[in-house]
Amino acid sequence: MRLLHPLLQLLEIAVSKHGVKTMIDVPCGDVNWQFGSWETDSLQGYIGLDIVPQLITAAQHRFAHHSNKVFAEWDIIAHCPLPRIQLRGTTQSSSVDLVQLRDVLQHLSLEHATAAVRSVFIHGPQFILSTSYPKAGTNERWRAKGKDRNPNLDWRATKLDGDGAWTPYDMHQPPFDFPQPIMCLAAHGAAQTRSTHAFDETCLYHLNATFKDKWIKEHPEP
């Protein structure tokens, strides 16, 4: 088996073993690792979204000759429906097979992170790939400690706090309540450190229709 970065390994598994053909990547960042294998580079449709316009412009120029890749500026907390995809040769748009939410929810307030997840579930993907902190997160407010909200200090976001701070959310606990993952891999490989950042995992989840419908009903818009 080829030695792949854990993040790329999970994407490859989603494509090769679970039939993923289309995906939304939000935020896509500088797209320096996502297409490191044939399986991911040759997806039928890839939509890269990011709030930073310079990153989107750079990706659009870099992959202008790739007909299977589209990039757009996007704010995941703007309460807009995620874009649907229309593949070449088809007449109708549809939801993508997989949405990747890597290292984004942990930078949002609890209210906005939950709203972002709700938008993804409403979009209707079969799979989600997301960051989680099962060893360090409880999704509850810790006592404030320090005005700079340093991630190594005892601070945790709530709906009363703004975005931009860092919080190690556990996606398997309320209010996120993700299902049992197909697989989780340590996001930084086997070489873990004592830092809280090293306890993050990237997990692949399957979302069946019954689960999505139940989740949306139990997590209404505020």
Image (cartoon, rainbow, N blue to C red):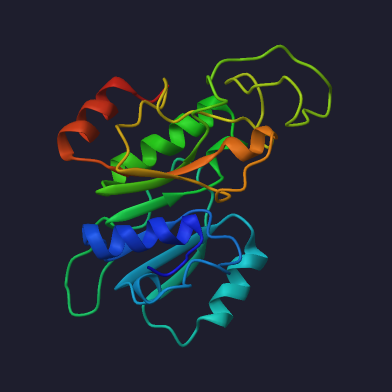
Q: Given the current orientation, which residue lies at the most extreme top position?
A: 143
For residue 47, above or below residue 81: below
Q: Nearer the viewer, residue 205 or 108?
A: 205
Q: Measured from the top left, where is residue 4 in percent x and y?
A: 47, 64
Name the residue at 59% across, 29% down: 109
For the N terminus, the quadrant is bottom left
For residue 116, above or below residue 17: above
Q: Given the current orientation, which residue lies at the most extreme bottom position?
A: 65
For residue 33, above or below residue 135: below
Name the residue at 52% across, 55% down: 74
Q: Measured from the top left, where is residue 211 in percent x and y?
A: 21, 32
Q: Given the current orientation, which residue lies at the most extreme right position?
A: 147
Q: How many marks?
A: 0
The answer to whether residue 60 is visible is yes
2 to the left or right of 161: left
Q: Measured from the top left, where is residue 121 in percent x and y?
A: 31, 40
Name the residue at 66% across, 32% down: 196
The answer to whether residue 24 is visible is no
150 to the left or right of 106: right
2 to the left or right of 149: left
Q: Nearer the viewer, residue 70 or 79?
A: 70
Corner quadrant of residue 142: top right
For the C terminus, the quadrant is top left
Q: Measured from the top left, where is residue 81 in percent x and y?
A: 37, 47
